[in-house]
Amino acid sequence: MTIIEWTLSGLLCGGSIVGMLWLAWTILTKKERKFIKLMKVYVGLPISGRSYDDVVLEIKTKRNFLNDLGYTVLTPMDGKSYLRNELKFKSYDYRYPTSTNHAIFERDCWMVAEQADIVFMDFTNSGDTACIGGIMELAIASYARKHTVCVIPIGNIHNHAFVLEASDVVFESTDYAIEYFIKLAQQDV
């Protein structure tokens, strides 16, 4: 049964058009759009110097949006709620077994090079500090031939030849990247 047939049959049974379309989209996302459900997006962003709440809010916003489109989302903060008491993230020297320098590097390399299909780096909230971890993840993703999508605003410190060349697609704002992910999810040709 197509989405149109399903919606019409639901309407004939007394359902609202909005409710029927929403339900039809939910069913399509779960059962028929398998290529997207299999697509994993690694979301990278500046972390050092920011608060736990700020980083997690940005990740949740991006995760919810991408999940709603059918993507599976991986992030460098997955499984790290034990860091919630950090007032300001430092760039190295954590003592938690899963957050040592080596553990962070290896896990992020594994997620970027072996797990993700797309690596989405949003450098918008980097301020005046280079996001070295994000740059490394981008370089690894590029070397591993992953599709790399970056947000680098005009005047951002990440406007650098190496970062730009490691990026398959570069947008100046997150809004443009969102439009791209919507079109990719809809297989808009």
Image (cartoon, rainbow, N blue to C red):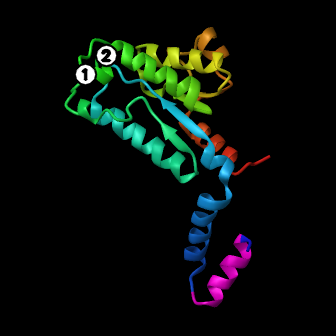
Whole-angstrom CA distance, mark 2 to mark 1, is 6 Å
Farthest-out residue, top: 161
Residue bearing mark 1: 96
The answer to which of 102 and 148 lies nearer the viewer is: 102
Instruction: Tell me, yes or no, whether the two marked residues, 2 and 1, touch with CB atoms within 8 Å.
Output: yes
The crowding category of the residue bearing disc 1, from other C-alpha atoms within 10 Å (few below 14, some 14 to 19, many at least 20), is few
Residue 133 pos. (x, y %): 45, 16
The location of residue 6, given as percent across then percent down, is 68, 77
Residue positioned 40% across, 14% down in the render = 129
Q: Amino acid at mark 1?
A: Tyr
Residue 44 is one of the magenta-drawn residues: no
- Vertically, is 25 above or below 142? below
Of residues 165 and 171, the one nearer the viewer is 165
Label 1 secondary element: loop
138 is higher (above) or lower (below) than 65:
above
Looking at the rendered structure, the number of numbered marks drawn on it comes to: 2
* Amino acid at circle 2: Thr
Question: Farthest right residue?
Answer: 189
Magenta stretch, main secondary structure class: helix
Quarter occupied by the N terminus: bottom right
Segment tinted magenta in the rendering? 3-14
Taking the image as shown, residue 126 lies to the left or right of residue 154, namely left
Image coords of residue 145 (percent x, y): 68, 22
Q: Secondary structure at mark 2?
A: loop
Name the residue that disc number 2 marks.
100
